[in-house]
Image (spheres, helix red, strand yellow):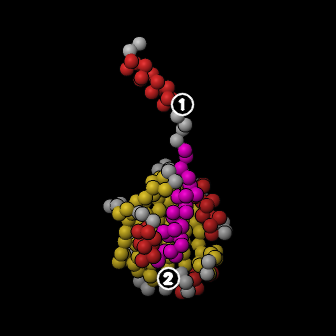
């Protein structure tokens, strides 16, 4: 056998023995979402500052805002965390008398069930509605805690610190985590 042939066989065998690539770490991806969307309370300047401080890079990816909302500012960024590609889209604006802001992160390779479980753990309560591909949590912030909202509490929350709607969705490309904040 030639020297090159021996080298190629050795290289192929070494490649076959290499460990499989690790699965993406959903907890790290969710923690990145919390840093830019949750911990900022979906406050647009705070979202922008958190994205900048955590190394998110500008991208041209665009997303749709809430139907009928007039968007005054928006940003889109990319990052990679825990083995997953992340895309951030945030905006703020208004719809009539309501001030609105949204912060969404698409987690490439993210698993819907895992992200739903992490969201439930972070909030401290189960979703108010859930299907096989989407879970929705309605809440308001009370200091450092999240309070689940019943239908009767939504107007008061919007008039106070703001009503927040966390949505976890899943598709073949990954998971989508988003918080929409509505304030009167």
Which of discs 1 and 2 lies nearer the camera? The answer is 1
Answer whether residue 101 is magenta in the image.
Answer: no
Q: Quadrant of residue 87?
A: bottom left
Instruction: Please name whichever residue, 74 or 9, is drawn nearer the observer in this view of the structure.
Output: 9
- Return the mark for residue 115: none
Name the residue that disc number 2 marks.
183
Label 1 residue SS: loop
- Return the mark for residue 17: 1
Instruction: Please name whichever residue, 159 or 145, is drawn nearer the observer in this view of the structure.
Output: 145
- Position above or below: 133 against 46: above
Q: Position of residue 33 (x, y in %)?
A: 51, 64
Instruction: Please name whichever residue, 127 or 32, is drawn nearer the observer in this view of the structure.
Output: 32
Give the residues drawn in magenta, as a range: 22-44
Asked if residue 9 lies left or right of residue 134, the reply is left
- Give the spatial CA distance, label 1 vs label 2: 56 Å
Q: Position of residue 174 (x, y in %)?
A: 49, 52
Is residue 155 visible in the rendered structure shown here? Answer: no
The total of numbered circles placed on residues is 2
Rendered-image quadrant of the N terminus:
top left
Is residue 3 visible in the rendered structure shown here? Answer: yes
Q: Position of residue 59 (x, y in %)?
A: 34, 61
Label 2 residue SS: strand
Answer whether residue 26 is magenta in the image.
Answer: yes
- Position above or below: 52 against 2: below
- Position above or below: 100 against 23: below
Residue drawn 50% across and 51% down?
Answer: 83
């Amino acid at each position: 056998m030639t020297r090159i042939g021996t080298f190629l066989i050795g290289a192929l065998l070494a490649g076959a023995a290499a460990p499989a690539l690790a699965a993406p770490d959903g907890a790290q991806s969710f923690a990145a979402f919390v840093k830019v969307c949750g911990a900022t309370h979906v406050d647009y300047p705070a979202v922008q500052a958190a994205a900048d401080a955590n190394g998110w890079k500008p991208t041209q990816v665009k997303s749709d805002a809430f139907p009928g909302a007039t968007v005054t500012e928006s940003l889109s960024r990319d990052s990679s965390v825990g083995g997953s590609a992340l895309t951030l889209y945030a905006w703020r604006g208004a719809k009539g008398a309501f001030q609105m802001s949204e912060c969404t992160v698409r987690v490439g390779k993210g698993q819907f069930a895992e992200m739903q479980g992490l969201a439930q753990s972070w909030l401290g309560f189960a979703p108010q509605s859930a299907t096989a591909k989407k879970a929705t949590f309605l809440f308001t912030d009370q200091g450092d805690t999240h309070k689940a909202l019943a239908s009767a509490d939504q107007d008061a929350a919007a008039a106070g610190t703001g009503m927040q709607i966390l949505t976890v969705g899943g598709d073949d490309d990954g998971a989508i985590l988003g918080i929409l904040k509505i304030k009167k």
